[in-house]
Amino acid sequence: MSFAQRLLKKIQVDALAQSVRSSIRPPGTEAKVDKEAMRSLLGMLGFSQTEARDMEFQVLAPNEPQGLIMVMDNELALYKGTSVEDVAMRKNPVVKEMVKIRNIRKILSDKDVVISRRQDTVDHVAGMIMGDVDLSFDKSDIEEIRALSVKALAGLDLQGIGDGAAMFSELLGFTDHPWTKRKNSTVAKGILDRSDPKKPLFGPCLIFDKGAARILWLEKPMDLSNKENRELFKAIVNGDRLADKTGSEVFDILTAMVMEKFGLDNGGRVDLKNRGQ
């Protein structure tokens, strides 16, 4: 697996985990956890689905003493060292089970088998997925990402262009542009500067227009509090105004930024896990 593939896996895992985290609400609220995203994360580890007492369980290595079990409800409790039958009894006991002292203790407290809940579970699962994934890279790895991105652009490969934009954004610590993050047709990411709360700045910024398979670059930071800048941004996205750079030149700029940020022109390798972004 190449560094590009490993980085895309990290991006995918982070996105799924964030989707689950953002759906978690305080106990007792009506909001439901993003179970589909949680299932996708568990699937990466080889969890399989089963049912008991009208509840969905996700299970990893059920026949092993240290196997993991998750009940797919809003609590996202992760169990270890027990069985589906035991967890099902704790979660939904019948009357005859509730009269036994041993069962009552289990029903009242699951601290002996629960290793995490809610957001801690999401973090635990994401950590298991990415734990052994090598996220170290050197200059040649970044040049490969650039080459893949330029090739995708030339072939109007929307998935490939989007992957390239996502990988460079991940490496550079870009955030979603507040003016486009809710729109499916346009992706805009860049540097957000909130040092002056009254005058937040966004930029430099890359824009990926999926509809026209275009990638654009805006060099100068824009004042987000300025309404005229918002109209200018829309005009650039719509193609009514020119961006600072377009096409493969954008990937050249992004490559140079990554090289400078991590000092890759001097040789050696960098590990995202150790250095961060």
Image (tube, helix red, strand yellow):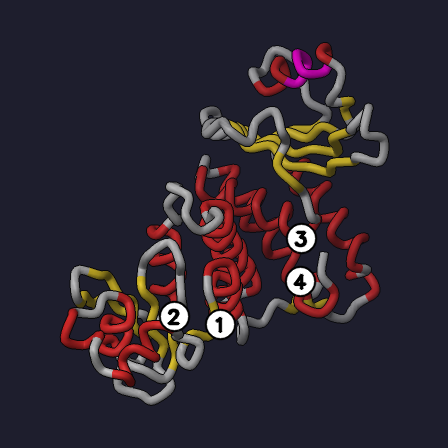
Q: Earlier in the sequence, mark 4 or mark 2?
A: 2
- The structure residue drawn at horizontal position 45% and vertical position 25%, both measured from the top left corner, is 211
Q: Residue 83, located in which quarter of the rendered image? A: bottom left
Answer few, some or many: residues within 10 Å of disc 3's Cα (few below 14, many 20 plus, some between 14 and 19): some
Mark carried by residue 171: 3
Real-space CA distance between mark 3 and mark 2, rounded to the nearest whole angstrom: 25 Å
Residue 249 point in image, percent of width and height: 68, 36
- The structure residue drawn at horizontal position 56% and vertical position 16%, both measured from the top left corner, is 238
Real-space CA distance between mark 4 and mark 1, rounded to the nearest whole angstrom: 28 Å
Q: Amino acid at mark 3?
A: Leu
Q: Earlier in the sequence, mark 3 or mark 1?
A: 1
Q: Quadrant of the C terminus?
A: bottom right
Real-space CA distance between mark 3 and mark 1, rounded to the nearest whole angstrom: 22 Å
Q: Secondary structure at mark 3?
A: helix
Choose mark 3 or mark 2, whichever is in front: 2
Pointer 2 and pointer 1: residues touching (CB < 8 Å)? Answer: yes
Q: Amino acid at mark 4?
A: Ser
Q: Amino acid at mark 2?
A: Leu
Q: Which residue is mark 2?
A: 45
